[in-house]
Structures are given as C-alpha cells and as structure tokens.
Amino acid sequence: MESSSLPFGKKFSPTTKKYREFHRKSITDTEGFWDREARRLEWFRPWDKVLEWEPPFARWFVGGLLNASYLCVDRHVKTWRRSKVALYWEDEAGNARTWSYSQLYAEVNRFASVLRKLNVRKGDRVAMYMPLIPELPITMLATARIGAIHTVVFSGFSAQALADRINSTQAKVLVTADGGFRRGKLIPLKEKADVAIERTPSVESAVVVNRANIDIDMKDGRDFWYHEQLKKAESYVEPLPIESNDPLYILYTSGTTGKPKGIVHSTGGYMVFNHSAYKWAFDIRDESVYWCTADIGWVTGHSSIVYAPLSHAATLVLYEGTPDYPNPDRWWEIIDKYGVTIFYTSPTAIRMLMRYGEEWPKKHSLSSLETLGTVGEPINPEAWSWYYKNIGKERCPIVDTWWQTETGGFMISPAPGIELVPLKPGSATLPLPGIDAEVVDEKGKPVLSGVKGHLVIKKPWPGMLMTLYQDPKRYKEAYWSRFPGVFYTGDYAIRDTDGYLWLLGRADEVLKVAGHRIGTMELESAAVSYPAVSEAAAIGKPHEVKGESIVVFAILRKGHEPTDKLKKELREHVRKVIGPVATPQEIYFVNSLPKTRSGKIMRRVLKSVLMGKSIGDLSTLEDEASVKEVKKAYEELKKLVKAGS
Ligand code: WTA
C-alpha cells in the first residue's frame, strides 16, 4: 500500500492538497455545499429547505420541483446539442443504430404518451425486463417524465425472480422484448415474461419491443407491440414537475435475507448527487464519448449509463453483448470505432480479458481513451496494472469507484474533475466531496490506520436510498442499527496512513459473483426448494476471474443418493429459480452442517474448509456452539472437499 507516483501527464497532481481542502470544506458545511451543487441542475421550482433529517430518513431539496427526463433530454434539445449523438448502439453481430438527442427526445415523448394511454399515472410502477437496447433507457425516461416509478429487472433473472419483483411493486405495465442476444444465442424474454405475468395479477398490459423478430404469443387486449403503439402516440408530453422526494425508481438488490430489498431512490437528491459525482470522478464534458459496459438491470446502469451521463449531455455507447464474443477484442474494436474517451467496466471483465493476452488490445490504437474506470468489486493490483498499461497505455488514470445500489452514486473514488490525486493500484482513494466516511471496529469506534474495520458513512448524502419499498423497519435495521447513527455499508475497509481507503469486500452474507450482487440466503432458499434437498448453505469462494464463485453445501432428504446427476439437477434448479448469474460452481452433498446452538450455519467454518485453512478459534463465537460437533462437521467436510466429492 505504498504511495506510487504514476505519471499522468498534465492532469496529474503530485499532492492531494487541493482535493483535501475541497473535501474538508464540503463536509464542514454539508448543506451549504449541496445547496450550491443542486443549482447545477434546472429546477421548475427551487427548494425551500436543503435537508430535512429525521434519522434515518432524509428528505433532500424539500419543496423543489424537477423532472429527470427533462434534465436528460429537454434541456439539451434547446441548445446546439439537439443534433449531437446521444447514443451509439451496437450488437454482437455489428448491427448499429445512432440516436441524436432530438431523436431520443422525440421517442421519450412518444413512449410517455403510450404509457399514459395505458393508464399509467404519477406514482404508478412500471416494470422493465429488457435486453440492452435503446428502448430500455427510453422507457425509463418516459416513465420518469410522467412521474411514474420504474423498476428494472435484470434480463438475466428468471421468470420467478421477475414475478417476485413485480408482485412486490404491484407494477401495472411490463415493458419487455420478444428476445435478446447473448453470445449469439437467443434469450426468449417474452416467453419468460409470459410465465411471470401469469403470476402477477397487477400487470394490466405488456408492451413488447420487436428486437429479435421471432414468433411469440401476443395476448389480445393485454400485449402490445412497442413500434405499433409509438405510431399512434402523441409527439409531446409535458414533463410533470416532480417534488424532489417523490421516487424516481425502485431497484431490487440482495441483502442478508432470502427476500431482495426494494431500494427506493428519490428524484431530486439522486439527480443532484449523480450529476456532481460524475463531474468529479470522470470529468465528463461535452466532447466525452462515454461507455459503461454494465447492464442497465443493475444500479450501475441506472446511474452510470442513463441518468448521470445523459444529464451531462454526453455521447453514450451501448453495447448488447459480452466482452469476448465473437472475439476477445470486441470491446477494443468498439472503443476505436466510436472514439470512446471514458471507459468504465468491472474488475471481472478486466481479469477475463487479461487472460486472453496483450495481443488483443495491441491490435487497436485505443488512442481516444482519456479516463478508465472500474466498479463493482475490489480490483486486484495485477488487474489494475494490466488495465493501466495495456488499455490506458500508461496515459489514462484509473478511476476506481466504490459505491452501492443503496448509495445511488459514487462515494469513494479519485476525482480528476477536481484534482487527480496520486493513485494506488487497488485503492479507491478518498471519499468524494460531501461524503463523510469512517472505518470502525465491531463496537463502532474508529480504528487506526492499517487496521481492518467496517466502512460507515457518518452523514446523509443526497443520493442515499430513501427507504426500502414498503418496509421502513427493515431499512432501519439493515443500515442504521448495526452502528447507531451512521450508515452501515456492509463492506470491510482499511484506511492507510495517507487516508486512502482500500475496500476489502463484503462483511455480510452477500456475494459478489462477477460483480453481480447475490445473497447467500436467496441461494439457500432456491436450493432447498429442490425436493431432494432438506438443508443448504451457500458461500463464496475466491475465484481468479469472477472475484467469487458460488459453492453450495447441501443435505439430502432421506431416500436420495448423492449422485452426479443429482448435482447437475440441483445446479440447474438454482439457475432456473434465480437466473444464470446464480449458477453454483461447486456443490457438495454433506451429512451435517456446522451450526451454532441456535441453529445458525457457521459460514466461517465452511469457508475455512474450502480455503484449506484451519478451523480457527471457536471460542470467540458470538453464539455458543457445540465445539465438538462443529469440529466433527469440519473434519467430515474437509475430507469431502479434498476428495472433490
Ligand atoms: C462492491 C454496485 C470494491 C462492494 C455499484 C459494495 C466495490 C457492493 C466497488 C455494492 C469498488 C462496488 N471496490 N468493492 N470500487 N464497487 N463494490 O449494490 O462490496 O451491486 O458493497 O452496487 O459492490 O454492489 P451493488
């Protein structure tokens, strides 16, 4: 964790002085600071009060009226930017489409009119289950335009996961596509959506984008083609003035129980926070051609593909495909084709592309790149250095952004838009302005530098979640009760002697598999819903490329034999219940699981077994366990894992 002084040409500053001063001021007078930041946006009516803080509920820019869709399109079409490219879209096969800001504006308006005709009103929920096509951001913006609330469900999730999310939000309309493509394979989205709609009585209508040109079932009176509806739509729909604290969207994410959490984001605070954080972290400008490779189904896609870059009138690249298909230089080819200046991806993707070797990026110039970013999981220094050298050509800083679905936007990250501080491979560097972060011990006391602890945020910030959808109690418990008065992130971190933060992964029961957030409890309930399984424990095992992989330990019901066939079936079952992102890499059938006396599975012991580590000190267990039994289970499991059973 030594200070490095990487050369970044003119932009690089040898100190952190200017940045630290800026940050110090921002957290001394936080409200004054955000009051000034909020003025960067265009409001229909100014706010009466910057912050109403009734812990743990924050209301930002109270009384202010604005509209997210207005900020992302209307504002730009009033200027020369109307003819600027808003979006370059491309698919795996090389089919491409380009949208100017005025085209985007026109279609957002038309689709807003379609939604109105389908009876969607302010506060109603609209669900989306779509591939990475321009119609997805268009649908989101159209929903926001009329004051409705969107809930995007990642298209890699199963029909059941989609149904659960729709039922939880009681969405009226589902927008989907006939299909999508991944590695040349057709993903039949409408077919899956149909299964979900059977289980979701709230859905009155479904709008279907013709993406794949395939035969699908369209139910009369319920299902409508997107393109047909657009033709009948009005060309202008007034953007509804929205109170800053009316929700913009609900996005489900995994927590420590089997039930995903519905993160609710506001309109005003969320937009202000993202607009500013984007300026600081990526120094985004008019001439930026910006590409974030995430899927819009995750928060990264919401903030970092749709709302922040469009609010800055950047030119986006949207690519519907995987990094190495059809070749491992597909991404590098796209960067050169569109002249991408800011490229933002995940450590998993970097590690995957790194494995294919340097010859692939070498085939391309990559000379348009100015700034690189990463997100989603800790980046190991080796991948950082490869990225820095082979993609950024030792010219582009790497902006390692730490944040969460809950935080709405970047929290800890270098900020070249203010001053580019010396980077250290593997560290997300310093908290962004307005963010008061601390590392604390189990009792909530700040730890010394170099000591691992829990990352907490001490003050509310505008991008923070408002609550969990229809569950304020769980919101309080999950984030504000572990350490009273501060926001619990669930991440471990270390602060070094320069004050730089090193994020060390989750401290709770949440896995990060290829950057995707999956709860162990969700995996376990999916496993036990398989008839042959009576109990299951899921844990994450370090994985060279994906960061973590899923390992399931399962106890079989009487009468079932532990066969390879059963393993395969169980793997398929979990995949079907949650989606392909949740596919277990390894499954072990066991006779018992190490548990505390109160019946809690001791994941720590399971992890030790997998890692080939000793069992560790059992005397520190918070809940007294039968040490003898745990040891027995440990020995048994060790044998099994060793045998690769
Ligand atoms: C992890 C993704 C290290 C972290 C935006 C966090 C990171 C979780 C980083 C949130 C990073 C995200 N370095 N770890 N730069 N960025 N994480 O909600 O564990 O899908 O708590 O949001 O990802 O995942 P989520």
Image (cartoon, rainbow, N blue to C red):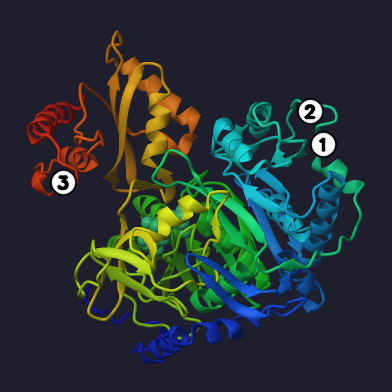
Check the image and report above or below for 488 versus 370. Answer: above
| SS for callout 1 | strand
| SS for callout 2 | loop
4 sits to left or right of 568: left
Which of pointers 2 and 3 lies earlier in the amino acid sequence?
A: 2
Q: Amino acid at mark 3?
A: Leu
Observer-nearest residue: 522 or 285? 522
Residue at image coords 48%, 73%: 371
Whether pointer 1 and pointer 2 mark residues with C-beta atoms closer than 8 Å, the reply is: yes
Does the image show residue 339? no
Which of pointers 1 and 2 lies earlier in the amino acid sequence?
A: 2
Q: Which residue is mark 1?
A: 224
320 sits to left or right of 388: right
Instruction: Measuring from the top left, give residue 169's x and y in whole percent.
Output: 63, 44
Does the image show residue 243? yes
Instruction: Measuring from the top left, give residue 228's x and y in whole percent.
Output: 87, 41
Check the image and report above or below for 626 versus 60. Answer: above
Q: Which residue is mark 2?
A: 218
Q: Which circle, 3 or 1, is nearer the viewer?
A: 3
Q: Which residue is mark 3?
A: 621
Residue at image coords 34%, 48%: 545
Q: Which circle, 2 or 3, is nearer the viewer?
A: 3
